[in-house]
Amino acid sequence: MKKSFIAIGLASVAIVGAGTWWLMQSKTDAPTYKTAKIERGSLQATVSASGAVNPVTQVSVGTQISGQIKELYADFNSEVKAGQLIALIDPETYEYRVRQAQADVDAAKAALLMQQAGLSKARVDADFAQRDALRKKQLVEKQFIAASDADSAAAVAASLFESVKVVEAQIKSAVATVAQREASLAQARIDLERTKITSPVRGIVIKRAIEKGQTVAASLQAPELFVIAQNLRDMQVDASIDESDVGRIKSGQRATFTVDAFPGQTFEGTVNQVRKAAQNVANVVTYVAVVGFANNDGRLLPGMTANVRVVTDMRENVLKIPNAALRVKIAGVEPVAPASSPSQAPVRGASSTSFLLNWLPSAMAQQGGQGGGQSAQRERLISELALTTEQQAKLDVVFSEMRPKFMAMRDMSDTERGTAREKITAEMRGKISGFLTAEQKIKYAALQATPANISRSTPPTKPSPSDLQAITPPAGGVAPAITGQGPLVDVRNRLVAELQMPQAQADKLDAIYAVNRPKFMTLRDLPEAERTRARERISADIRAQIETILTPAQKPRYAQLVAEAASRQGANSRGRIYLLGADGKPVAYNVRLGVTDGTSTELMIMPNSQSADKLIEGATVITGVSVGSASTAPKAPSGPRLPF
């Protein structure tokens, strides 16, 4: 009996121990979450690069002649003026060349004088021979001399006249020889002048490549003697930007940089130029961005290595989350599908295709739409046409039958899709009209030709005072926002709020969207290549029409909003984050992301989104997941790390 009690006791201890171990193991296996808070603040998107500090203008001073450096009049860091003598090449050889050239000129001029004297003598002899020929001609007429004598005298006169022409040609040759010798003399004098090396600009000598007594040889390329920086007060950083980032760099952007010579100090500049010439080093393509800055104190020197950060975008007072939250993946936790309700029905201003009832086919055919467009149109038909319970059931059957046909349009070409959409839409309308009463058919036809009713119950988001400092609020108050989902609803509501539009101005804005809505609908039938250009043209027309209804005070703010939207367009992306619920369990949300500074990322929340009340400042976001407690985790080995 005693042994039985002992056995029962040991078994009880074993069971308790096993249960304790199982509980501890379950507790150990429960995941623990690292969390952070959603914050509100500023973000700067930057591009990092490295480059060298250089003067804005630096001149390499060389020589066009060869010779020995006789004197040096400038050294490193010497301040020089334009035209100042900074070096002298031995001029003795070139002085003798000038003398030789001068002697050649004198000899040519003497030869010219001799030719000119010979011309005078030839002209006198020719005149005498001509007069002698005339006298002999007269004597022949009187038969005092033979005719042969007269002929001989005429021949001599003609020969002497030709001799005058020869001497005149010789004089022209002598004149040309004098000009040639004078040109050689001028060249010799220029070479002699070039022995004096002068500074072409006012600046500081930052490099001297010669020594006194050194021989320089100018052959195919002029040797470099000095490098002169024109101004060390205005300098620049030639930063090498990677080809993947160069599209974000534009002139006028603010940049900061550091140099190793002054650790902890940041210098500011502005991007002045993005050079289009690519540099390919080891198959790495980079482009040079010139960052200008003021070096008033002269601390930064040419050639210093600069680590540059160019601010490509900036956000003020935005929600931001740690980048680690975007890398978290929790298996089995998916976002909750949005619930449909009548208040979510698309309204005027919602999107380019969500206003007319015939938008339903495209909504049903969109991939990833989660049924939002179909549910909204169903609720609208029920409310507008006052459908009975039986009619609602028939409507659901029609939607169920037509949905596969619309989904099948995804695999069609653009040309086939447009024709198929028209056929399916007509078929669907015919089926819906089949169970409507005569009165309902009239309303249904009117719904296909008129936009949806506008609900103006949601108050607009109040803009920050800094954005509206130049806009005077209207006397009758700002027009209210409209409800609905879609990008254009958000754009419309933001324009009304940011620009403080009165009701009359908001009606004009709605009219602009209504007029241009059919243009967007026609984009579906265009080829992909033409669709982008057509969308840009329509958007440009809308912006121009909006500017016509704005006041002078609103136009600058509108231009700022357009520029901000353009910058956000390239930065927007999508991601998934997990918030820690009140019960300690993760809840997934699909979110839109904006710019990032490498540590945090902008969280873009639409005002009318279902998660707007959850994704707020101070919400707890999961940044990491670990399984097992710290007490059971293996400890890191102590001691120095082995080199293998």
Image: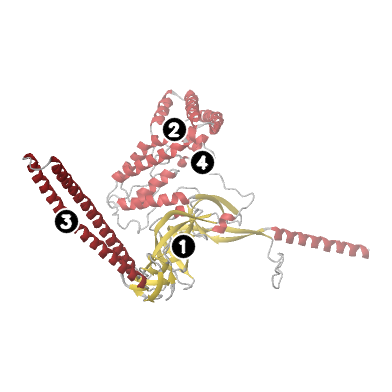
User: x, y (%) of residue 382?
Assistant: 47, 33
Q: Is residue 456 above or below residue 7?
A: above
Identify the residue position indicated by label 2 in the image.
Answer: 357
Q: Please, what is the three-letter code of the amino acid marked with disc 2?
A: Leu
Q: Is residue 384 above or below residue 591?
A: above
Q: Which mark is residue 121?
A: 3
Secondary element type, mark 4? loop
Q: Amino acid at mark 1?
A: Arg
Mark 2 and 1 residues: CB-CB less than 8 Å, in contact? no
Which quarter of the image is occupied by the C terminus?
Answer: bottom right
Q: Quadrant of residue 7?
A: bottom right
Q: How is the image coloured?
A: secondary structure
Looking at the rendering, which quadrant does residue 290 occupy?
bottom left
Using the image, determine if residue 522 lies above or below residue 175.
above
Q: Is residue 510 left or right of residue 220?
A: left
Spatial CA distance of label 3 from label 1 is 88 Å
Mark toward the start of the polypeptide (3 vs 1):
3
Q: Which mark is residue 309?
A: 1
Q: Are marks 4 and 1 in contact (CB under 8 Å)?
A: no
Q: Are marks 2 and 3 in contact (CB under 8 Å)?
A: no
- Distance from disc 4 to disc 1, alpha carbons, whole Å, reads 46 Å
Q: CA distance from mark 2 to mark 1?
A: 51 Å
**Proximity of marks 4 and 3: CB atoms separated by less than 8 Å:** no
Q: Position of residue 69 (x, y in %)?
A: 40, 73
